[in-house]
Image (cartoon, rainbow, N blue to C red):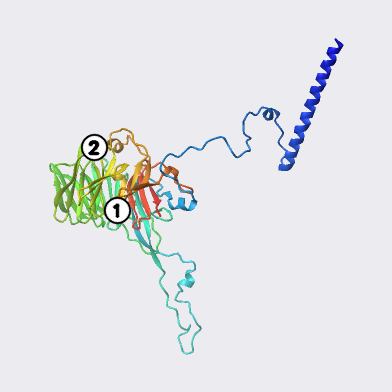
Amino acid sequence: MQRKNLKLLIALIIIVLMVIFTYFYFDKTNDTTGDTTGDTSTGTNFVSDFFNFGVKDKTDGNTNEETPTDISDYTPPENTTEAQKLRLTKVSSMPVAGFTVFMKEIYKDVANPKKTNPSSAEFSSPPAKGGIEGGSKITPTAPATEFVPILRYVAKETGFIYQSAVDKILERKFTNTTIPRVYEASFADKENTVIMRYLKKDGKTIETFTGELPKEVLGADTAEENEITGSFLPENITDMSVSSDTSEIFYLFNFKDGVAGTTAFALGSNKTQVFDSKFTEWLSQWPNSNMITVTTKPASFVSGYMYAIDPNKKDLKKILGGINGLTTLTSPDGNNVLYSNNNLNMSIYNKQTGEYKQLGVRTLSEKCVWGRASDVVYCAVPKYINGSLYPDTWYQGEVSFSDDIWKIYTTDGNGSKILDPLISGEGTSTEEIDGIKLMLDQTENYLFFVNKKDSYLWELRLN
């Protein structure tokens, strides 16, 4: 019995010695680590040290998580410089009914204007004997000027007009004439005329107001108290477009048992009827001085047709027909028509050769804009398209897209995605975009569009 107790005592002593040895060994190791890092405030958790089955230390920068693989054909810019070249920026602080971009003359920024442009009171030499007091006077030179792109846009809720430089967004109020709940706005006459369309209080009658904007003075700050003066065009204008040189407008209105199409100067004078039809549902475009196009309003199960009007000869020629869900966009030179069908398949029809060419992307033609040379289009292309009835469900707001921005060369059909707004690169804004009303500036360095989701105005720097 004593021998058994002795064995138990020896075993207990061995266990106690092992525990003491283990404690001092690990305590020494932890003291050394603490001295090295200079941090002695953290103790040791023995449970986590002894039962750490593959859990990585929280201080280790590496993790076991795998980065998701990008399976799209778009690669975001890898360096900051390239990312900033494709910069997506929200322009407006409110929903807009329409916008334009134009070139405006401004004074150049001068680091030291006193030395660059001396005033008439400055002299280059002391008075000469017998000469005019003050000696020879330096003739003052006019400050240098430059032309820069300017955005001008109409607030939906108030009808107030705002503007901002393109390269440096600084929103400034330009007019304070209140026109509530403007549905659609256009600019004409080299952006000196605004055309606003809205419903009257009865909720049925369409009013179209055309107004002359105040002239701006070179070098003067934009005033906020400018008033718009103008007049009203006929009630219930169903569609309107501005000529490519912005000097005239074309509008459609119901007349007797059909519709009439009329051209006029931007403020409504010099009216000339150039079109009439028993069919009343048309959408128009004025791509160049010799061509106005009218396309039947699209529906998924209805064959669409497109015609060209020569406003000088007042004749009508069929361009396209028999295409369900037809939407169209004619090139500036009038030779090519970008169009989509009820599957949103994009194609180009060449009027001169009679050839049809599919572009391999799916979107609506009104989500695109032609380059000035008629050889390239920029389009907002949906990432995903479900099996809805198009374009009906998109017009009715039942479907909303999340778009990428594409650049497509129409000569060979080659195209590339130039921006995913959700992965737009370092230093840029990210947004889910359903792009409409696309427009390029004169130099084609910037692309502008309105987000159909909320009607805010955006710009994308291309170069």
Residue 177 visible from this viewpoint: no
Q: Amino acid at mark 1?
A: Asp
Residue highlighted by disc 2: 299
Residue 453 image offset from top left, x and y in percent: 36, 40
Left or right side of 422 for 301: left
Residue 51 visible from this viewpoint: yes
* Label at residue 375: 1
| Residue 47 or residue 366, whichever sits in front | 47
Q: Secondary structure at mark 1?
A: loop
Residue 326 occupies quadrant:
top left
Residue at the bottom extreme, as displayed: 130
| Residue 214 or residue 347, whichever sits in front | 347
Q: Residues within 10 Å of mark 2 (few under 14, many from 20)?
A: many
Earlier in the chain: of badge 2 and badge 1, it is 2
Residue at the top extreme, as displayed: 1
Above or below — where is 160 with respect to 132? above
Q: Residues within 10 Å of mark 1 (few under 14, many from 20)?
A: some
